[in-house]
Amino acid sequence: MSNVVGRIRGAFRGDQRVDPDVLLARLDAVRRFLAAADGHLPDSRLVSAHTLVERAGTRLALSRDHTVVALAGATGSGKSSLFNGLARLDLSPVGVRRPTTGVAHACVWGAQEGAARLLDWIGVLPRHRFVRESALDADDEATLHGLVLLDLPDFDSVQWSHRLEVDRLLGLVDLVVWVVDPQKYADRVIHTNYLGEFHRHRDVTLVVLNQADRLSPAELPRVLADLRRLLDADGLEGVPLLATTATDPGGIVELRAALERTVTERQAALRRLAGDVDTVVAGLDELVGSDRPTTGPDEATKSELTRALAGTAGVPAVTEAVQQAYRHRAAASTGWPLVRGWRRLRPDPMRRLHLPGAPGEATDPAESLVAATSVPDPTAAQRSALGLAIRTVADRAAAELPAGWPDAVADAARSRLTDLPDALDRVVAATDLGMARRPLWWRLVGAGQWLVTLAALGGLGWLVLGYVLRALGLPDPEHPMVGVVPVPTLLLLGGLLAGLLLAALTRPVVRWGAVRARRRADQRLTAAVAAVGDEYVLAPVRDVLANYAVARDALRDATRR
Ligand SMILES: Nc1nc2c(ncn2[C@@H]2O[C@H](COP(=O)(O)OP(=O)(O)OP(=O)(O)O)[C@@H](O)[C@H]2O)c(=O)[nH]1
Ligand SMILES: [Mg+2]
């Protein structure tokens, strides 16, 4: 008597072939995504992608000729009975006491090699593995060659270890046959925790209503229709739904035929992994957003950062010292020669800060690279201004980025914060402030001052000589005259007056020169400090943005089926 009550509702979506090359390209894209996102996004968000890449690599490397099919379902639904029925042997214990099956059992159709490594990886113990050799069965079983059938423990088990084992195995198999029975087919746990979760794996999902013999011919279509409705609600529209009776060999013909088709196609493993990629990519979607610009912080933000860095580096104190040093040194070079020495006794303002370009300072650039300045430490206000500027850089750079990335950008912007003070001090010490050489005009004015001073001293000497001769009663030589003024007097007064005049004329020029020297030093220091900001703050931010762009493009590639 033909007791076939199996009926296929809905077409098996076997027509959608998965091209292995396309799948490998998608997995590679996920790998590229991970390489770009690792270290930037929290590990917890990347676990599923890492697991996928690892599993897919192993599964494809192990065997593409085998199809691993799992019988999953609640306790007592008849998984082991179906397993034995399909194997046509009593391999897995069928029990009255529930749950019966505690660990997965496997039956391999055809040659063992390849399948053994696959089962090692899946974690089925050798003593729970069985083989259907075609030699024993003539060619009866040839159509199932390549099938690795697993009988799983119950997923609604009172035994927590069963559930963990089922969850683990469901992540590894190629195709899942969900076995439900007329009593429990509507259980919430089956639909919410399992079937609903598999909606991206419709291509590798099959649902079986077992124990169909317990339903009357009138009840069966009603239960099947109800189950179909529940499956649709789970997002499993179109998955094949069969009715089986495991205890009757004729009651599993449709299921067997479906498995034969699957095994012959050799597509299930690829479809399963393609579904896994879909799931992972969908989970990562919010981490990449759509086409968003990743240009980084704008110019205004960058100059704000440079200003804050300049404050921290003590640039205002340095430029002030440059201005003062200019005046100090100009006075020492162009001032009245008789008091110049006294000026030199006062310390040079740049030397106080150990800045390069002070007289007597090292001019060897290699030496000044390691030299540290004595620029005052940044104040609390300057430090918080720098903190704020760095935060602003991060905020502006990350303004358009989706979840997860703004934190990565903020971390990157701060990543080298502790190295900043030393780096700033080094560049301040190494920057040529333009004060190493004395300007030519100082020397000319200095020479002029000497000239008029010598003239005044000459006149004075000449006058003193006249007085001495007169005092000794010696004849006083006639002084040459210019008009009514004797030449020595003219030399003395003229020399003094010219010296004063030269000093008076020089002063505003020195003041102007000092301002210019300060501005030049400020420009050079600002450029140097900006370079530090670029290296220590902006470059790490740019790195994250570049990685974001790579991650976004990679994920887009991973969605291409
Ligand atoms: N009438 C009828 N009884 C069935 C059918 N399938 C299984 N059974 C019976 O249901 C009981 C449970 O079957 P099992 O195959 O052990 O169920 P299982 O799903 O493996 O259960 P666990 O191993 O506990 O998860 C046994 O007594 C089977 O004989 C069926 O199609 N019709
Ligand atoms: Mg069992």
Image: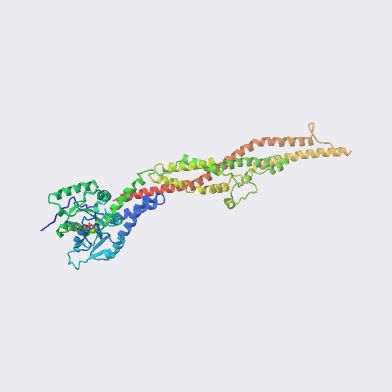
Residue 266: image quadrant is bottom left
Q: Residue at x 81, y 36 (%)?
A: 480
Which residue is the extreme one toward the front?
A: 97
Q: Is residue 274 visible?
A: yes
432 vs 554, left or right, is right
The x, y position of residue 198, in whole percent, is 27, 51
Question: Looking at the picture, does residue 1 appear above or below residue 420?
Answer: below
Task: Give the percent coordinates (x, y) of residue 389.
Answer: 48, 41
Q: Between residues 313 and 175, which one lies in front from this camera angle? A: 175
Residue 326 horizontal/vertical position (percent) = 63, 41
The one of 6 and 509 positioned closer to us in this rendering: 6
User: Residue 103, how many percent across, how many down?
Assistant: 28, 60
Quadrant assignment for ligand 2: bottom left
Q: Is residue 276 left or right of residue 503?
A: left
Q: Residue at x 78, y 40 (%)?
A: 458
Quadrant of the rendering where the N terminus is positioned = bottom left
Note whether residue 475 is visible. Answer: no
- Whether residue 489 is situated above or below residue 375 in the rendered picture: above
Residue 61 in the figure: left or right of residue 514: left
Q: Residue furthest bottom?
A: 135
Please state if 373 lies on the left or on the right of 390 as rendered.
Answer: right
